[in-house]
Image (cartoon, rainbow, N blue to C red):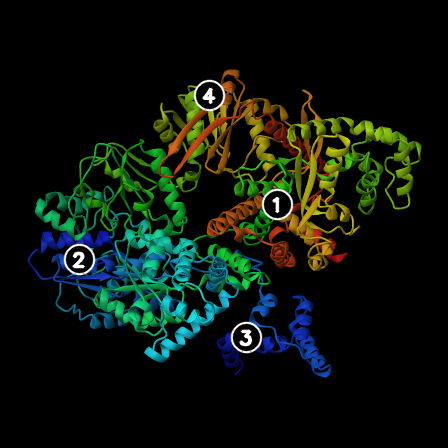
Amino acid sequence: MVYYALTTYHVLCCVLHKMAVHPQEPATLLLSDIHRNSVAFARRYEQSGIFDRVVVLPELSVLDHQRYLERKHLPVKLILRACCRRMEELLKAQQVSLKGQELYLCPDHFPFGWYVIKNRMPYHCFEEGSGVLSDREFALHNMKRNKTQYQLCFDLGCFGDNEYAIEVLADVGKQKPGYTNPKMKDFSVDRILSEMEPERRQVVLDFFGMGEPLSLRENSVLLLTQHMANLGLMTLEEQHRLYQLFADYLFPAGSHLVIKPHPDDIAGNYRRIFPGSEVLPFAMPSELMRYGVKGRFQKAAAAYSTSVRSMGYLCDETLCFDSRILTDWKYIPEYDCTVRFLQEIGAKSAVTNGDEGLLTELSSMAGDKIAFTHQEHLDTSAEYVVISDLEEQNPDPLERAREMESYLKAANAKAVVFCQEREQFSFFTGENQPVFAHIRPITLKMGDQQRQIFVYTKEKAIMEKAEQFHQQKELPYTGVTVDMKGISTSEAEKIRVLEGVLAATEKRLNDYIQAGKKG
Amino acid sequence: MISRILEFYKRKRRGFKRRIDRWTRRFTMHNRMITEAFYRERSPKIGRFRRGLYLFLLCMASVVGKVYSHKATPQERRDYTNRVCCFRPESSTTKRPGYPTLAKQLLLCDVVSFDVFDTLLFRPFDDPKSVFYLVGEALHCPSFTRYRVLAEKQARKEAMEKNGSNEVTLEDIYQKLSRYAAFDIHRAMELEEQTELSLLQANPYMMQVYQMAVELGKTIIAVSDMYLPGAVIRQALEKNGYTHIQRVFLSQECGFSKRSGQLFPYVREQMGPDKKYLHMGDNYTADFIRAKAAGFDTRYYPNGNRLGNPHRCVDLTALIGSAYRGVVNNRLCCGAYRENQYFEYGYAYAGFYVLGYCVWIHERVKAKGIQKLLFLSRDGDILQKVYQKLYPEEDTEYVYWSRAAATRLTAGCFRNEFFLRYIKYKISRKINMTQMLKAMELPQMQPLLTEAGFLPDTLLTSENYEDIVSVFLSHWNVVEEAYASSNRAARSYYEEKLAGVHSAAAVDVGWAASGVSALRVLVEDVWKLDCKIYGFVSGANYMHDQNIIEAPLAAGDIESYMFSQRKNRELKRRHRVGQLYSVYIEMMLASPSPSFLQYEEGEDGKPAFRFDLPEVEGYGMIQELQRGILTFVEDYTRAFAQYPWMLRICGEDAYHVCRFIVSQPAYFRNLFGEYPVNRAVGTSSYEMETLAELMEREYRD
């Protein structure tokens, strides 16, 4: 019997299938070297004794050869033939014989799968991920990066859509409602794990390096990381800063932090940036989480991975944002200052054109929860408004300023807060100097850095509160204290200088406007 | 056939290019006369053929004229051939692999092995031999560096003859050293060890890799070909945060080196032959080829100084120059930081000049017993920030000042300055009376000028210049009255700033020290405040009158850091004002704020400020530049925290680094081409030109 696996989840499927269905039969596990984790832990997998033999299949070299031939513009058929030839050589070199063996492939759309289908070998197919059999869009979308693989997926009938696939092992309960497939056979990882005897389950946990279950404290919180740096979405340093801000702002102070790195988040240095925290093994599939810990988490947070949503069985509260968080995270201190100010002036609800989820969460962490509603075009009747310029589309700053001016004129809001992520004085057209009579800045000092948010209000009481506003927030993981303060009258010279600069700016803007009118 | 030739050429293109370069270099560096003439006249606009022909003619002239002079040494060649990275950030040219890529490689091995020097640890020098200068200084031995190098060479030679290996210990070297100078060997060795320990710092890139290896639970070892004792190397590693290194393999302890190819098999034998190894190091032969041969997986980490030095200025003093290049290379070439070009401009060039200038000012302040430093706007902005960082205990202030304000405030004393700045220098701009008076803020002069026949739209010309001046002179009381309130506001402002201060110094960039001179006159003679004003400028060079500040320079009231008629006059001659050298150096000290225009009396009687139109388009660039300067100062001072005298950068060194960059117009055109320049400073004209336009005009003229 031969099992073939690529990712950590695939390895888990193979392990569970072997233990549940063929516990006594000899079996070989072929690990593809495309996924580094599998290769790195091959020795440990072998030592576990679940499989009689664990072989690392250098499949990456076949994939490289395929890309090379693709660059030479060879037809897909020839590429397939060349790849299969190479795969045969590799199997020979590794002394793996597939003849007369029962084959379990997880998945079947990589070179080993091509080889099996091309050579008309009957096999059992696992679905790519839980529930993916009925929803292949995401998997196919990812595959588009490799043209040949995408083409072969349809030509060969991968995902079990060919005559040689005997059955497709999939989690029936997680498929799209109404989905049917005559070859589909139920294989639920969650169910198998829950039905397993604890001793046998411990074998699975040991296999993935979990060891003894972690006993949670009352104030434990869970941070599920993602491999943003690996995907090129940000640098590793930025990824670390993002999670430091998450831990500082989104978890209660003094919480016991437990981190579960994403299986591909190998570069993350969480023990260093979160001293005193528990870091779970990154190569552990999240399906094992419930057996890897004893107790419940107060809160679990992830940046934009929805997998955290399905962890209600383990956490009192789950938190996840959308992809906007990839840009918004840098401005968490400004948003926190905004919600703190709104709380101080007694706001219960507010509208925003920014990240309403993040603002709401920050408000609940800072004190009384404020219900934020997202509006693309801000409502003039709203009582409290938070303006973000991150999603601003209009490239002309003067036009943007005019739009903002007309909004401020029409609005009946008690207070409008400008978060000014990108642009300061976005409300100033060069002609509406009286607007400054209603503007009060709040300065955020974070070590050497200084940022500002502006409060626009016509109410004297709110204006005074903005002037006297002073709060501090310690960020233990980031290692700074944020000092949020309204501008005081003692800084008279500074104000005079700013007035001078502003007058000069106004003059320049007006000159531009005049030139524009003439032109 | 043709396609075959093309194919062949494509394959061999690199080789051809290398050969051509080698031949060109051989001809170019043939002798001094050719080298200097060729590089002086080299221009990217001249084609290869013409350049080749020119080189050929130079060689012929050298033969015919029997010019025999020495060939440029490799060090000297670099002064001709080193080039700045004009079109992309230097930090992105190193092409170090990203952390996720390395993490995947780390994951596959059991033991991670690192080279120590220039990989895990950096010295703040581009040449390790520079450390010997510091040891020699502590030993009061002037030729120590040379002796130390010779002694090491001899010790290695002897070891090779004796043991067949050139591995030596520090003691072996110092035994040999006793032939050159008689000092306590043990004390000297200890001094060298202590000096190394005090200078070594962690490589931020490798620190991250090391931490990833720790996080992944790998066994970490260090392997080095080094004469220093193992205890010192272990101490250096621990001191710099490498606390999880399980074993350190040293060539001198094992008796064979990495380069010989024997050390890696020994490591393998010691750590376990079945394990998977990954080695990272900066030496291609010792760390890449030899490790690979021993079955290690390898990751070559090219030496940062090798990558960075072709872009560094070399014509500097040996010790400070090495320190400058080392500090800059360590940051820009280590791979941990991806910075933008503005930051790099601040870090690699402006930072060195600003640091040197600030330390020099501090020395002058101490020598003259100056109580307070006034950093004049806007150039003083970054200078004050750096000075504050270096000497936080000193009394410093950033004060608003400008040529425009000074001209008006001192109009009563220096009338000609007033006429020159507002009338004569504006003739070329073809402005009319209205525009001229707008810049002066003297609209009340228009009826008087009209009376004299100068209508509002009359153009300013060199023919009517003297007549206009006559009108002003005959109605001078109008000018004085118009500027009286501004004068009162300025006085009140400086009275507050100089309260209780009897000696202060004004700091400016240069060049005629007009700001400093004007402030001196106002404070000492006009307002008669009880305070002596000194002046510090970074360079004194005034195109219109070379001797303008000769007397104050001679009297010591004004001092120049880099050059003046009295100091480094050769540099002054090479400072080409016409090629905008001064403008580029001023840009190093730019501030993200508008130019100061004038003092005003506020409604409450307190001084208020008026500013010129802000060049906001350039503020983002300037902020990055300032960040670069501050980071350089931080890195350099941290590296030499135990050697404060290493901060004493002489003006000549500072200028050479500045000149290295300001003599590259392509760099500025690319980087600051869009930078707004208000050539009519003080006229409140919104019509700004870009630096690219200014360069085109000035270079054409």
Q: Secondary structure at mark 2?
A: helix
Q: Amino acid at mark 1?
A: Ile
Q: Which residue is mark 3?
A: B17
Q: Are marks 1 and 4 on the same chain?
A: no
Label 4 near label 2: C-beta < 8 Å?
no
Subunit of label 3: B
Q: Amino acid at mark 2?
A: Tyr
How far apart, in angstroms, are the residues tagged by discs 1 and 3?
49 Å
- Where residue B668 sits: x, y (%)? 63, 54
Judged by depth in the image, the label closer to the viewer, 1 or 3, is: 1
The answer to whether one can see residue A143 in this image is no
If the image is split into quadrants, where does the N terminus of chain A sit? Answer: bottom left
- In depth, the one of B56 and B689 nearer the eye is B56
Q: Which residue is mark 2?
A: A45
- Where residue A24 sits: x, y (%)? 6, 58
* B494 over B689 or under it: above or below: above
Subunit of label 1: B
Q: Secondary structure at mark 3?
A: helix
Instruction: Find residue A383 and name its label.
Output: 4
- Where residue B258 sits: x, y (%)? 34, 70
Q: Amino acid at mark 3?
A: Lys
How far apart, in angstroms, are the residues tagged by discs 1 and 4?
56 Å
